Every structure is written in structure tokens, then in C-alpha cells.
Image (cartoon, rainbow, N blue to C red):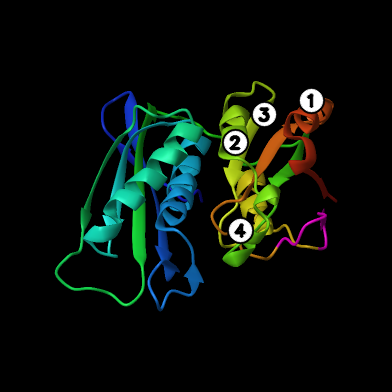
């Protein structure tokens, strides 16, 4: 299943809801990962935006759930704005709430993104005759900061969402590449024995620093050229 909730809003439109959380990542003394609060918010917003875009919905609202205190609200907002700008979504509204009654020893943040799309009917889960690839690399924690050049840019993901030869795509989350490939192919029986991948398929994708794409074999050259050094082929053995 995709990491979104689908809520019917009318006979021909539905609301898509995606959320990402970060804990112990920020500027507090006891945070496990020390990083500017703007970066924390950027990556959490990035994840939720990618989940919404991946199901062909258009984001219209970002909600910031700030448990880190009033003093970081502007940093969180700026981080969210940066992600929206990179995704060419500057018009999306930002709102939210701050827990200011009880201070926490570690940073805590939740980002919810709402999107809209036409009602989707008769989606096919299991299809044949497609090729698959990873764009970017799975990174988490300090790896994201130390290897930012390996993370797929959000602007590239947005381009892939609109590209006519890319039939489907999905961000890689904490369950890793193999689990998301099972979702994308509709084949829950896939294992490491019948999937060849140059990257670790079991490590967390962190803040979706990579994503999977589905395409026809004859279009692989075009997508490889588009993604450049971020492109990694996946081979599924029968």
C-alpha cells in the first residue's frame, strides 16, 4: 500500500493525505542528529510532498506540527517553503500549530501535506512488460548530510512525475527499496534472490533520498539520460 490516505470529497474528486515525522533531529542539546531546523523541515516536507505527487495529486496545503517550541517556528516554515519552491509549488498554503506549554528535551516535528486529484478507478496493481530503476540512493541520519550529492533532487522527482514515459513512481521510505518495489510491481513475493540491485535494498530510504520508477524497456535510455548519475537499474529475475 502507498503511504497516503485517500478521502472522497465529491463524486469526481478525492483528497490525498501524506505525513512525515522527525524526532531527535534538530538543534536541541539532546538531539541525536544535530542539524539546522530549516533542514529538518525541508526533508520532512519533501517526503510528504513526494508521496502526494507520486499518486498524481496536486498539493494545496502544508500543515506543520511543531513540538520543538515557538523559537523554531520560522525555521520550520522556511524549510517547508524551500521544499515547496524546489517542487514548483510556491502557491501552496502553510499553516500549523506549536506545542508551547511543555518544552521537550529533543526536537519533534510532523509535516502533513494535503493534495487533490480526480477520482481514480480500476487501478491495476500487477502488470508485466515493464522495467524498473532506482533514482538516487538510500540515506538516513547523518548520511544525508555527508552524502547530499547522492540524494535525488526534489526537482528531478517533480520532473519524473510529469514525464510521459515514466508510467509510475514511488518514494523509498524507511522500509527500503525492496519493500517499495513490491508495492510498485504489485508483487509481494519479490525477494533479494530475484532482484538485482546495485544498492542496499534493505536500509532505510530516510527522507526519501531515492525513488523507484516504472517504465517500458525501450524508454530506459531516455530516463537514464534524464536522471544522469542518480540512475540505477533494477533487474527482476523470473
The label shown at residue 157 is: 2
Disc 3 + disc 2, Cβ < 8 Å:
no
Q: Which residue is mark 3?
A: 166
Give 124 or 154, whichever is nearer the viewer.
154
Instruction: Place residue 156 in its image quadrant.
Output: top right
Whether residue 226 sits left or right of residue 43 in the image: it is right
Disc 2 + disc 1, Cβ < 8 Å:
no
Residue at image position (69%, 36%) is 214
Q: Secondary structure at mark 2?
A: helix
Earlier-in-chain disc, 2 versus 1? 2
- Residue 192 pos. (x, y %): 78, 62
Report the mark closest to the observer, 4 or 2.
4
- Residue 125 pos. (x, y %): 59, 41
Q: Which residue is mark 4?
A: 144
Earlier-in-chain disc, 3 versus 1? 3
Earlier-in-chain disc, 4 versus 1? 4
**Residue 103, placed above or below residue 61:** below
The label shown at residue 222 is: 1
Amino acid at each position: 500500500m502507498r503511504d497516503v490516505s485517500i478521502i472522497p470529497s465529491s463524486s469526481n474528486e478525492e483528497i490525498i493525505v501524506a505525513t512525515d515525522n522527525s524526532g531527535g533531529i534538530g538543534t536541541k542539546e539532546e538531539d541525536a542528529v544535530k542539524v539546522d531546523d530549516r533542514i529538518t523541515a525541508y526533508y520532512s516536507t519533501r517526503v510528504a510532498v513526494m508521496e502526494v505527487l507520486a499518486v498524481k495529486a496536486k498539493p494545496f496545503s502544508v500543515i506543520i506540527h511543531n513540538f520543538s517550541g515557538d523559537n523554531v517556528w520560522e525555521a520550520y516554515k522556511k524549510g517547508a517553503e524551500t521544499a515547496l519552491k524546489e517542487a514548483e509549488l510556491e502557491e501552496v498554503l502553510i499553516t500549523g500549530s506549536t506545542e508551547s506549554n511543555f518544552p521537550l528535551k529533543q526536537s519533534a516535528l510532523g509535516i502533513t501535506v494535503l493534495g487533490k486529484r480526480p477520482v481514480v478507478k480500476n487501478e491495476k496493481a500487477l502488470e508485466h512488460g515493464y522495467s524498473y530503476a532506482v533514482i538516487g540512493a538510500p540515506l538516513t541520519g547523518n548520511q544525508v548530510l555527508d552524502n547530499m550529492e547522492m540524494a535525488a533532487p526534489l526537482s528531478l522527482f517533480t520532473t519524473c512525475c510529469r514525464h510521459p514515459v515514466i508510467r509510475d513512481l514511488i518514494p523509498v521510505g524507511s522500509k527500503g527499496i525492496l519493500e517499495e518495489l513490491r508495492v510498485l510491481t504489485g508483487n509481494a513475493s519479490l525477494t533479494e534472490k530475484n532482484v538485482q540491485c546495485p544498492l542496499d535494498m534493505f536500509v532505510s530510504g530516510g527522507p526519501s533520498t531515492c525513488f523507484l520508477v516504472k517504465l517500458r524497456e525501450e524508454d530506459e535510455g531516455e530516463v537514464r539520460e534524464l536522471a544522469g548519475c542518480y540512475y540505477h537499474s533494477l533487474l527482476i529475475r523470473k
